[in-house]
Image (cartoon, rainbow, N blue to C red):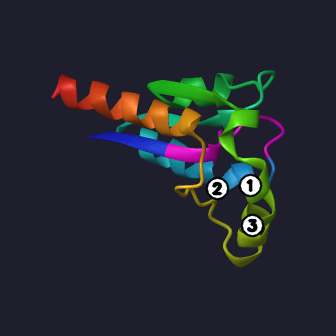
Amino acid sequence: MRILFVLPELPHPPFTGAHTRPLTLLRAAALQHEVAAVGAAPAEADLSLLREICAEVRVAPAGAARPAPRRGLAAGRRLVTPVPLVSAGRSRAVSDLVDEMVKRSSSRT
């Protein structure tokens, strides 16, 4: 089975609490499935571990991933739930990468 993970921020060192849970889920899924990850990361982020785990990793620029007015709301949601949420307020950069991955996946089947 192919699984596409859409993450607000791709896990990269240093692995903080926000990165630990998605990284654990990616590792577990990759044991038995083909995993791809899409999300934002700073240009200097070391994604080598993520690229080892996943069959494909697509990266949107970190600055383009979250419009400035939503930062406060996103920080508030982290107080309510430990799971990062991806909503319609996300940028076109991440959305376009997801659309591209879905199209490629459906053309392979």
State the mark number for residue 73: 3
**In this rendering, position of residue 18 left or right of residue 97:** right
Task: Using the rendered image of the protein, determine whether residue 98 is visible from the camera's viewpoint.
Answer: yes
Region in magenta: 6-15
The residue wearing badge 1 is 18
Residue at x 51%, y 45% (from the top left corner): 6
Of circles 3 and 2, the one toward us is 3
Q: Secondary structure at mark 2?
A: helix
The residue wearing badge 2 is 21
State the mark number for residue 68: none
Residue 104 falls in image quadrant: top left
Image location of residue 88, percent across then percent down: 52, 55
Look at label 1 and name its amino acid: Ala
In the rendered image, residue 14 lying in the magenta stretch gets the answer yes
Q: Secondary structure at mark 3?
A: helix
Mark 3, residues whose alpha carbon is within 10 Å: few (<14), some, or many (≥20)?
Answer: few
Residue 91 falls in image quadrant: top right
Above or below, comparing residue 32 to residue 101 in the picture: below
Q: Earlier in the sequence, mark 3 or mark 1?
A: 1
Dots 1 and 2: beta carbons under 8 Å? yes
Screen quadrant of the N terminus: top left
Residue closer to the observer: 35 or 106:
106
Dots 3 and 1: beta carbons under 8 Å? no
Look at label 3 and name its amino acid: Leu
**In this rendering, position of residue 9 left or right of residue 1:** right
Look at label 2 and name its amino acid: Arg
Q: CA distance from mark 1 to mark 2?
A: 7 Å
Image location of residue 73, percent across then percent down: 74, 66
Residue at x 34%, y 39% (from the top left corner): 33
